[in-house]
Image: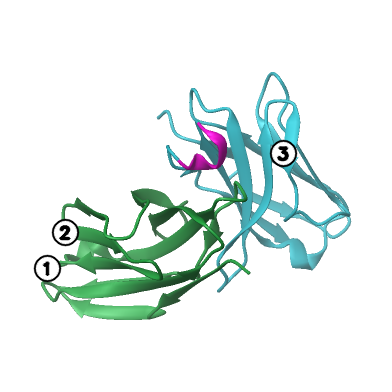
Chain colours: A green, B cyan
Amino acid sequence: EDQVTQSPEALRLQEGESSSLNCSYTVSGLRGLFWYRQDPGKGPEFLFTLYSAGEEKEKERLKATLTKKESFLHITAPKPEDSATYLCAVLPYNTDKLIFGTGTRLQVFP
Amino acid sequence: NAGVMQNPRHLVRRRGQEARLRCSPMKGHSHVYWYRQLPEEGLKFMVYLQKENIIDESGMPKERFSAEFPKEGPSILRIQQVVRGDSAAYFCASSSDRGGGNQPQHFGDGTRLSIL
C-alpha cells in the first residue's frame, strides 16, 4: 500500500536555528514527490517537485532532497514567517491522486 | 488572482440538508481533483475529473456524494443528506496535465463545511 509518514509532527525552532523535516514513503512506483506549505485557514501552497533519487531543489531558505525511501526539507536560518505546516505528498505511477502525509507543524520564534 | 477559486469559503448546514461546493480551476487547467481534510488528519483524495468526465472516484463515498465538471462552469462537489461526520475542509486542486506529474496540482483555499 502506498504510504507517506512525516516526522516530527511538530517542531519549535528559534529564529536562525536550522533543522530538517523528514518524509518517509513507500510507493509502488514514484512519479513525483511534492512539498507544500499550508498556513492556517488556507490551502496547500506548492513548493517543490522531486522526481528521482539524488535530486535537490532550493528556494530561499528551503532545500528539498530525495532518496529512494525518503525526502528531507532542510530549513536554513528560519524566520518567524516560515511558521506553517509543511506537507509531503507522493504521486504514484499507477494513479493520478496525491497521497499526503499528515504534515509537520513548524513554529519559529523570534 | 488567477488561482484556484473555491466558494463558499464557509458553509453551515443542518443534518439532512444538501451541501454544494464549487471550484473554478486555474486558467488553462482541465484536470480537477477534490480532497477532504479532517481535523488532525492528512488530505485524502476523493475524486478526479476532467471536463464532463469522472476519471477516478475511488476516494469518494458511494452514497450521498457526487461530483461533476460540466463543459461550462465550475466543478461541483455535492453532498446530499449531510451528517455530522461530513464536517471537514474540502479542497479543490487543478493541474494542466494528468495527475500533475509534470506540472503540480495547485490548491484553492478550501470550503469549511460545518454540520449542525
Confirm whether the magenta stretch covers residue B100: yes
Q: Residues within 10 Å of mark 1 (few under 14, many from 20)?
A: some
Q: Which of label 3 and label 2 is nearer to you?
A: 3
Kindly identify which residue carries mark 1. A77
Q: Tell me the amino acid under the disc marked 2.
A: Arg
Q: Tell me the amino acid under the disc marked 1.
A: Ala
Q: Is residue B36 left or right of residue A38?
A: right
Whether discs 3 and 1 lie on one chain: the answer is no
Kindly identify which residue carries mark 2. A61
Q: Residues within 10 Å of mark 2 (few under 14, many from 20)?
A: few
Nearest the camera: B34 or A1? Answer: A1
**Magenta segment, principal secondary structure?**
helix
- Magenta part of the chain: B97-101
Q: Residues within 10 Å of mark 3 (few under 14, many from 20)?
A: some
Secondary structure under tag 1 reads: loop
Kindly identify which residue carries mark 3. B55
Q: Chain of mark 3?
A: B
- Tell me how far mark 3 sits from mark 1, CA to CA: 43 Å
